[in-house]
Amino acid sequence: MNTRRCSRAVLPVAALVLVAVMLAALVLLPQQACATNQATATQTVLRLASGEWPPYTGEHLPGNGCDSQVVSAVFAEAGIEVHYTFLPWARGMLLSKSGAVDGAIEWADTPEHRASHFISSQPLSEQCFVFFHHRDGAFPWQQLEDLHQQRIGLTIGYAYSDVFKPLQSKYPAMFSEAASDLLNFKKLLHRRLDLV
């Protein structure tokens, strides 16, 4: 699995160019009216929604996280200052759709997101998704279908791409949604879930 360290130094120049193209398209989209606030006579401010997802994004992380640093650096090259608003993920997407903020970062490429936002064909970063379970609750599995007898906790507003859609339609009772990761981990601790 390819992973990226949280440092601009390990990002190839080609990745920065792709991010620049992606973000320039976001600025130019007519359906997303970018901010016209002037921080200075020459600098435009772009308001972007994001959620807490360390180390990629976070209100209290250095530079608001490594992905936020890349986004900010690319826009800075064009004289645009980025201000991040950290919100629950679903609320950030709604504010982006309504125009209350200029856009949102860190969203998966799904048909729903592509219908209302520009989604780059190149990822800003790559992540590895994992399951958490009780240390005494391990079980063998090779593919997601093997998990059909497990209770899996999902967080409302998170984008899981399309990985769970076939299982959700075939085994809807195996999934339980909660308002936060913390609630899901509490359910896992009390054995109301098998996986988070």
Image (cartoon, rainbow, N blue to C red):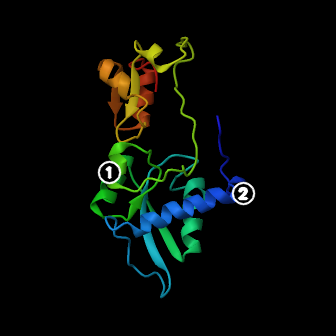
Name the mark on residue 183. Answer: none
Residue drawn at (35%, 43%) of the image: 111
Q: 122 or 108, which lies in front?
A: 122
Residue 110 appears in the picture as rendered: yes
Percent position (x, y) of residue 53?
Answer: 51, 46
Q: Residues within 10 Å of mark 2 (few under 14, many from 20)?
A: few
Rendered view: 54 above or below 18: above
Residue 65 appears in the picture as rendered: no
- In the current view of this chain or complex, which residue is farthest to the right? 9
182 relative to 62 in the view: left or right: left
Percent position (x, y) of residue 80?
Answer: 51, 74
Percent position (x, y) of residue 77?
Answer: 59, 73
In front: label 2 or label 1: 1
Q: How far is mark 2 from mark 1, CA to CA?
A: 33 Å
Percent position (x, y) of residue 20?
Answer: 55, 64
- In the current view of this chain or complex, which residue is farthest to the bottom? 41
Residue drawn at (34%, 70%) of the image: 33
Sequence-first tag of 2 and 1: 2
Badge 1 is on which residue?
115
Amino acid type at mark 1? Ala
Where disc 2 sits, the SS reads helix
Amino acid type at mark 2? Ala
Rendered view: 52 above or below 24: above
Badge 2 is on which residue?
9
Q: 35 or 84, which lies in front?
A: 35
Rendered view: 28 above or below 185: below
The quadrant in which residue 4 appears is top right
Where disc 1 sits, the SS reads helix
Residue drawn at (43%, 45%) of the image: 109
